[in-house]
Image (tube, helix red, strand yellow):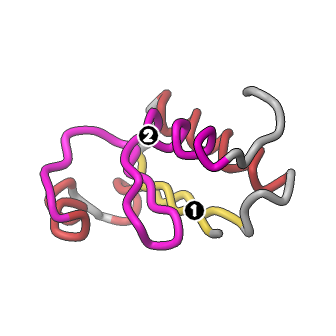
């Protein structure tokens, strides 16, 4: 399982998503993750909307194995639902 996080600098939810992904990677729950700084890469919310297929109002936008999961809250819920971490975080 590979996670891609689209975010921006100084975004607290983006930082929380990166920390959760790093923890998942360190426990072997996922194969790895990639953080994409949308500002540095020149990606707009409109670009993300085309990929996701619906309006994007916030970041992060997170994909698991190329499937859009949502933002940090949805990613956190996904991790819990899939029991990817054995202890609460």
Magenta span includes 1:
no
Image x and y of residue 16, in percent? 58, 33
In screen coordinates, is 23 left or right of 42?
right
Mark 2 or mark 1: which comes first in sequence? 1
In depth, the one of 61 and 84 nearer the eye is 84
Image quadrant assignment for residue 30:
bottom right
Residue that badge 1 annotates:
3
- Circle 1: element type: strand
In depth, the one of 83 and 33 nearer the eye is 83
Q: Residue at x 55, y 57 (%)?
A: 35
Magenta span includes 66:
yes
Q: Any mark on residue 88, and which?
A: none
Give me the C-alpha separation between circle 2 and circle 1: 13 Å
Question: Quick one: quadrant of the C terminus?
Answer: top right
Q: Residue at x 13, y 50 (%)?
A: 55
Q: Residue at x 49, y 55 (%)?
A: 5
Question: Quick one: quadrant of the N terminus?
Answer: bottom right
In screen coordinates, is 1 left or right of 57?
right
The 10 Å Cα crowd at callout 2, few under 14, some 14 to 19, many 20 or more, is some
In the rendered view, tell whether residue 24 sits above or below residue 32. Answer: above
- Circle 2: element type: helix
Q: Residue at x 14, y 56 (%)?
A: 54
Image x and y of residue 52, in percent? 24, 63
In screen coordinates, is 29 left or right of 19?
right
Residue 10 visible in rendering: no
Number of numbered discs on residues: 2
Foreground tag (2 vs 1): 2
Image x and y of residue 74, in percent? 43, 40
Residue 38 visible in rendering: yes
Tell me which segment is drawn in magenta.
Answer: 53-82
Image x and y of residue 81, in percent? 58, 43
Residue that badge 2 annotates:
74
């Amino acid at each position: 399982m590979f996670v891609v996080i689209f975010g921006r600098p100084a975004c607290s939810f983006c930082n929380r998503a990166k920390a959760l992904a790093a923890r998942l990677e360190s426990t072997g729950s996922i194969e790895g993750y990639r953080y994409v700084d949308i500002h540095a890469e020149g990606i707009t919310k409109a670009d993300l909307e085309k990929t996701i297929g619906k309006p994007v109002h916030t970041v992060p936008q997170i994909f698991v194995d190329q499937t859009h999961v949502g933002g940090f809250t949805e990613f956190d819920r996904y991790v819990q639902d899939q029991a990817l971490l054995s202890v609460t975080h």
